[in-house]
Every structure is written in C-alpha cells, then in structure tokens.
Image (cartoon, grey):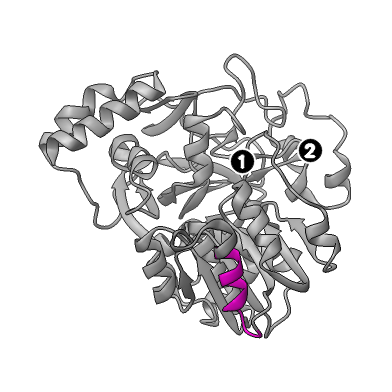
Amino acid sequence: MRALAYFGKGDIRFTNHLEEPRIVAPDELVLDIAWCGICGTDLHEYTDGPIFFPEDGHTNEISHNPLPQAMGHEMAGTVLKVGPGVTQFKVGDKVVVEPTGTCRDRYRWPDSPNVDKEWCAACKRGLYNICSYLGLSGAGVQSGGFAERVVINESHCYKVPESVPLDVAALIQPLAVCWHAISVCDFKAGSTALIIGAGPIGLGTILALNAAGCSDIAVSEPAKVRRELAEKMGARVFDPTVHAAKDSIEYLRSVAPGGDGYDYTFDCSGLEVTLNASIQCLTFRGTAVNLAMWGHHKIQFSPMDITLHERKYTGSMCYTHHDFEAVIQAMEERRIDVAKARHMITGRVSLEDGLNGAIMKLINEKQSTIKIILTPNNHGELEREPDNEKEDISELSNCKDQERLKESMNEAKLRHT
C-alpha cells in the first residue's frame, strides 16, 4: 500500500510498496485512515532519531518489527474490517487511535521472541503510559497513520462523536497529551496557569485548561502567528523576546493575578531557559509541569528555586484511556470548542507531498506553521505547493544527508520567492 515511511535517520520516503496490514489477533481491526497529524516527535525522529524507532538493523522490543515503518501516530479513520473477537466496533464506525505500544500489547505479535516476556513494573501497576519499553504505532512498534490503512487492537480505539469531523478527531491524541498533564498535576478549577510555548501542545493545553475550569491562562510565545492563535483561543499572550530572560520572568510573574506568579505552569518548549522560567514563574506552592520531550543532555538548574517556596516540579508522559475518554466527552459537551481546536490545523497535505510539503515545512517554517495533517486517502481539500517549486525539490526526496536536504529546501524556497 501507499505510505510515507521511516527508513532511518534523515531518510523518510514515500513508497507504494509497504506491506498491507492484516488481522492476526482476534480483537484487532483494520482502519481506513482519513487524517493523521504530524507531531514534533516525528520531526525529531527525522532530524535526531531514531528515538522511538529501532536502530537500523534492529527490531522493536515489543513487536519485533523492523524498519521501514509508516510514520504517524495522531490517527483518525473509519473501521474497514473487524476481527472475530471485536465487540465494541463495527465496519463504518469512525474512530480515533490511542497509539501506545506497551507490555500489554505483546500478545499481538505471537512470533516475537519477547511475546512471553514478563511485563515491566509500570505495566504491572496499570501505568502503561510509562512502560519501560514504550513505543508508538507510527513510531517503532508498528506502522501508523501515514499509510492508507492500519491494523490496531480495539482497546486502543475510541468512537468519534458525530459532532466531531475526522480532521479535528486527528487532534484528539495531542489533546489527550495535554489532558493528561492537567490530570498529573491535580489541577484545581479556578486556578491560574502560564503556558510556555504555543506550538500544538501549548495550544492544546489552552483547550484542556478551558475545559478544566481555568480562570486565567497566560501564554509566553516568541512567534507572532502562534501568539495570535493563542489569543483567539482565549489566552493572554506575551512575547518573551521583548525583555531579557531575567526581566521576562519578573514581568510574567508581575502580570499574574495577584502579581506574584501562577498556580501552575506548563513547559511545552523543552529548553533550559523555559524549564527555569516554568519554576520561577510559580507562586508559593505552585506546580510546574513538563510536557516537552528532551534530548539526552544535562542543564543548569537550582533545586532551591523549588525548595524556598515549596514548589513542585513534575513530568507528564503520554496519556491513558481515561484521557482519551475525557477529551472526547469534553468535545461532546462542548467544553472543548471544536471550532477553536480546528484553528490549530494550518495545513492539509496528501501523503505523496508529506515530506516536502509538510515535514520539511514544519522544520523550516516554524514561524508560520503549527499543525499539518496528512490524508492518505485524499479526504477533504488539500493545500499544494506551486509546481515550479515542486520541480526544484522533488529530486531531493530520497536524500540521506539531513543537512544537505535542509539547505537544498531553503535554496528552493528562495528561488521560488
């Protein structure tokens, strides 16, 4: 089948020859993918990976699946086939996918040498979102939604309400990431919050906080287009580049209700300066939450920034089925505004254009792009690059030198301009 597949670091290719998914376990079903969003994790897999994907020549610990695999884990689609053990879904149902692959999914790959391996301590306790072997459908465990079809077990699927179109349904997975962060920090309705970084997860956190009864949401974001979108979603916005780092923190604290910092902060950027800002912008006994994915590097941090004011710092990883159910319910009850959520989508691209028209655009044009979704089966209206630009860059789609590819893409854009 057609797919945009990961072959290795800096090597993503469109192919017509990815293996068609088939039902193996009785509780599996096949989905016809309508839309699949591109996540920051996908970009990092391309530029810095493999991270969740296995190293070249290796296989995934859970599934024993090798590369290549179709990317994409923010999936929404329609049930095409059901296995004999499926009880909750029928052909034609519209669903969204919770894409984690953990110890509890080992049974789906009976030929894997690890099929009978003992579950990790987290999975034994039901904390599968922090499984020691965590992977994703679309990032290591199996092929995902950058393909025409995907096979998944029904415990990872959720029905999409009729009031939610499938393009917005593709946002439920990143919104579940945001909802989980609200749950992890035990957010209290009526509290104040600062979000640092207004990419897809930062914007999604605005929607989750709205639904959770947040009384005041501030967003710190340097990109104008993202600040404007955050403001449309009801947040107060600030440009941190107006002030020096220390002055910016003092200013953000001063404009919080009460003038002494926020009850909760959410770091959606993952930089040393934003981590420290997330702690220093808290009020007494406030809680800072990290939603960002960090590389394996150390940073400067002072524990006394927490201790002196009895603050808390915690991480939030992925989501559970409770988070998916809560997001869907909030959409049904209109506590999450579908129209506001749709504002996050800044591009709709076909699978064939996924590398040059979407992934490279998100890497090189962060100031003007937020969330691009791909359609393997040509659902809805698409956005296309001008033909002359396509001709300039098409021959580069299989380039394995990441830096050369980035430079060539930028040169092509300049020539077109």
Q: Give percent across and percent down for residue 28.
A: 62, 45
- Residue at coordinates 38% horizontally, 24% vertically from top-left? 403
Look at mark 2 in the image and give the residue it sits on.
Answer: 132
Q: Which mark is residue 170?
A: none
Name the quadrant of the C terminus: top left
Residue nearest the observer in this picture, 384 or 70: 384
- Can residue 159 be seen here? The reply is no
Q: Give percent across and percent down for residue 281.
A: 66, 67
Q: Give percent across and percent down for residue 343.
A: 37, 67
Q: Give percent across and percent down for residue 102.
A: 73, 41
Could you tell whether 236 is left or right of 58 in the image? left
Secondary structure under tag 2 reads loop
Amino acid type for the residue under numbered disc 1: Leu
Q: Main secondary structure of the magenta part?
A: helix
Residue nearest the observer in this picture, 13 or 234: 234
Residue nearest the observer in this picture, 72 or 301: 301
The residue furthest left is: 388
- Residue at coordinates 64% horizontally, 59% vertically from top-left? 277
Badge 1 crowding class, 10 Å Cα cut-off, few under 14, some 14 to 19, many 20 or more, is: many
Figure check: 233 above or below 134 = below
Figure check: 20 above or below 31 = above
Look at mark 1 in the image and give the residue it sits on.
Answer: 136
Residue 188 among magenta residues: no
- Can residue 278 be seen here? The reply is yes
- Residue at coordinates 78% horizontally, 26% vertically from top-left? 114
The residue furthest top is: 57
Q: Which residues are magenta?
A: 248-258
